[in-house]
Amino acid sequence: MTLNAATAAARLSTAPMMDWTDRHCRFFHRQISRHALLYTEMVTAPALVRGGAVHLLEYSPEEHPVALQLGGSDPVELAKAARLGAQAGYDEINLNVGCPSDRVQSGTFGAVLMRSPDLVAECVSAMKAVVDVPVTVKCRIGVDEQDPETVLPDFIARVVNAGCDYLIVHARKAWLQGLSPKENRDIPPLDYDLVLRMVEAFPDTPMSINGGIETLDAAQALFDRGVNGVMIGRAAYHRPWGVLSEVDARIFGVEPPSSTREGVIDAMRPYIEAHLATGGKLHQITRHMLGLFAGQPGARQWRRVLSEKANRPGMGVALLDEALDRMHHADPVTG
C-alpha cells in the first residue's frame, strides 16, 4: 500500500487493543466497514524474532487494509520483525510508543519510550530501511512529569526526521507509576488542542488523533479542525454497529458492506464454520460480537446467550439463531 493509500485509509481507524483486536475481531469489524484501517493487537518483536511466533502474523485477506503494530526497543530486532510483517502482507508497520502497562515497561517499550526519542528515531530508521510499506508511530503526548508542550514537538521532529510516515497521537499523558493501564485511558486529561497544533507545525506529516472519541460526529468535529485522521478504540469495540456502520458512507463516500446487523451475522457464518472446522472454538469469535446490538431492544438477551453458551463443547453457528430468537422475543421492559 502506498503512503497516499495508507493515509486515505487512516482517515478513520480502529485502535490496537490487547486481547481485543485479534484476527477474529478484525474480520468481524470488516463486515461492518470495508474501508476503516484496522490495527492488530500489539505483537512484540522479541516474540517474532527470538520466539519464532510467526503464527501471530496470521490474518484473513479480507481484513485489508490492516496494520501490524509492533512492540520493542531494539532497532535490529524491530527491523527483522517489520520485515516479517511486510512479507506477510501488512499494509503498514506501526511502532507502539503509547502502552503504559507494567509488562510493556519491563520490556523497555511502549509509553516509556517517550523518554527516549533518539532511540525511537533509530528504531523507525531501521524499520524504514527494510520495508516498502509505511512505517508509523503511535505515541502519547508525554509521560509522568514531562511537559508535553516541550516534549511532543521534539519527539515528533526526531521521528519524522528518521522517516516516520504517519503519527497517531493519543492525546493524553501516560502516568507510568500510580495509574493502571485502564486509568491511563481515562484519568489524564485530553489535550486535543496540543495535537492539533502539532498538525499545523508538521504539515508534511499526516497525523491521526486518538483518545476519548466515541462517535463519528466527534470525529467530524476534529476533521473540521484540521486533523488528518481519527482513531477510535473502545467505542468501536463495544458499539461496533453504532460506530462503524456509517464509516464507509460518511468518511469514505461508498456503500457499506451490509445495511443491517443481521446481514453482518450472515456474513460471519461461513467464517465461523471454517474456524470450527479447523478445531477453533465458537466463543473465540462471538466474544467480539457481543456489542453488535448495543442500545437495541433485547440486546441483553443476545449478549447473555452468546456469553453463557458459546464456550460450551459442540456449539456452532446455530447458537447465533438462538441468540437472535431470544433477542426478538425479549420483554421490551426488562430486556
Image (tube, rainbow, N blue to C red):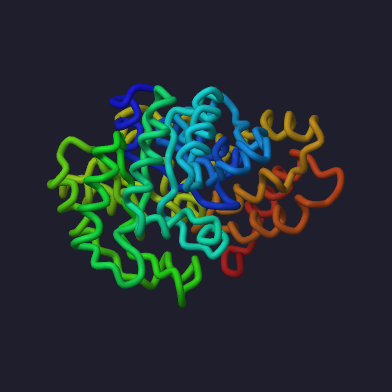
Farthest residue toward the right?
313
The residue lying toward the viewer, choosing from 221 and 193, is 193
Residue 104: percent from left, percent from top: 53, 58
In which quadrant is the N terminus drawn?
A: top left
Q: Looking at the picture, does residue 300 appear above or below residue 165? A: below
Residue visible at 45% across and 74% down in the picture: 177
Q: Looking at the picture, does residue 227 appear above or below residue 34? A: below
Residue 292: percent from left, percent from top: 55, 49
In which quadrant is the C terminus drawn?
A: bottom right
Residue 120: percent from left, percent from top: 37, 46
Residue visible at 18% across and 46% down in the picture: 199
Q: Looking at the picture, does residue 112 appear above or below residue 88? A: below
Residue visible at 58% across and 57% down in the picture: 299
The residue lying toward the viewer, choosing from 156 and 25, is 156
Position of residue 311 in the picture relative to residue 146 (left or right) = right
Residue 246 appears in the rendering = no
Residue visible at 60% across and 48% down in the picture: 288
Position of residue 157 in the picture relative to residue 312 (left or right) = left
Residue 2 appears in the rendering = yes
Residue 114: percent from left, percent from top: 35, 57
Which quarter of the picture shows residue 36? top left
Position of residue 302 in the picture relative to residue 6 (left or right) = right
Position of residue 163 in the picture relative to residue 271 (left or right) = left
